[in-house]
Image: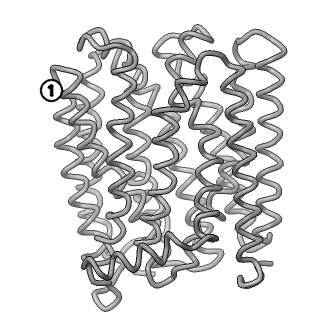
Amino acid sequence: MNSEISYRLLAVLLAALSALGPFSIDTYLPSFLEIGAKLQASPWEVQQTLTAYMLPFTVMTLWHGAISDAYGRRRMILGAMVLFALASLGCALANSIQMLWLMRALQGVTAGAGLVVGRAVVRDVYQGPEAQRLMAHVAIMFALAPAVAPILGGWLHTWFGWRSVFLFMAFSALSLFVACRALLPETLPPAARQPLNAPYLLGAYKGVMSSLPFQAACLAVSCNFLGFFIYVTSAPVFLIRHLGVSETGFFWLFGPAMAGMMCGAWLSGRLAGRCSAPRLLLLAYALMGLGVAVDLGVSFLRPPGLPWSVIHLFIYNLGMALSMPTLTLLALDRFPLQRGLAASCQAFLQSGVNTLAAAALVPLLWGSVGHLALGTLAMWSLGGLFSYGFFRLSLPRLPQRE
């Protein structure tokens, strides 16, 4: 590895960069009602600020990795942080819901750069179990952001109003710019870079996206995460309407959920190199299944209430986070010479699924806790099928992982 940065410092930087995307969603969730009141917007119009953010986020994930493959990882990250800070400032100054949609879209253009390029950086500097451990350690710290973000957003909303939330996002991006400029080395030497031209990119994207094992691994990660993400995008309704908490009580959802993610990521790091990928994923899906069973039981056998209605989030996310580093690396390992581009395609598929869910699926589910539980059951089932499909398609061609 490049001697200019330590393992721990790299993990912290990559976790912070990766967390910027979900942080941009979770921090302003407690402000939904005030945004609607101040900008004279309906709940549906405020909900579409998520869609306005996630659509360009999804599209741009196809380009972040390719640009970093051509011009380097560091340059891509620094430029993205500056542009994200400017877009966040625009959100804070928005005087209409349409203006907020536009600025949220500009946020989405750059917010995924840290997540996509960060995955490529891991593979630039580490291989095998070491890469899995770094991914797991990044995930542990990454999990802190969604736990802290809505709490911080609720405090900012209560003390200073909804605009302060976006000012804080701008400050966070500028802080990351300063930290990366001072501490993050370039991990992709010029000799290893790939050309950024249309014929090459079309061929490369076609090769990656047409790989059935790659698709299966990416969709497995997406469905696993979506089993939790439907609660994130439903948080204002789930917590305030169904469970009766205030705007500062979002920790009831994100606290147990992120504790589960941290424990799962820690367990993934401990098992790296000690447990084969199929066995690790079998354990992960068993844990997620237990969480689904608890969710269904609580949702249909008793009225909504705390803490029972959120216990399943810890169990489910424990299994989900255990599976994520392994599935992510299995997908990237299929294209060792195009890791940045493969990471872009991976993020595109995952964020595309999340975008569709936020825009179309979640509004159909948030009417009752039972519907949300059934949504999680469906996502867990699909995730398991896609993981099984990955090994059926590619396991004979993979080296044994014992």
- The image shows residue 141, relative to residue 145, as above or below, that is below
* Residue hosting label 1: 93
Horizontal arrangement in the rendering, residue 46 relative to residue 373 (left or right): left
Q: Residue 55, located in which quarter of the rendered image?
A: top left
Q: Quadrant of residue 93?
A: top left
Q: Position of residue 95 (x, y in %)?
A: 15, 20
Identify the residue at horizontal 55%, vertical 45% (top origin): 143
Q: How is the image coloured?
A: one colour
Residue at image location 32% in from the left, 64% down from the top: 63
Number of marks in the image? 1
Q: Which quadrant of the view contains residue 153? A: top left
Amino acid type shown at disc 1: Leu
Give the vertical position of 84 relative to 71 (above or below): above
Identify the residue at image location x=58%, y=21%: 366
Element marked by disc 1: loop
Q: Residue at x 42, y 64 (%)?
A: 344
Residue 236, how many percent across, how many down?
49, 19
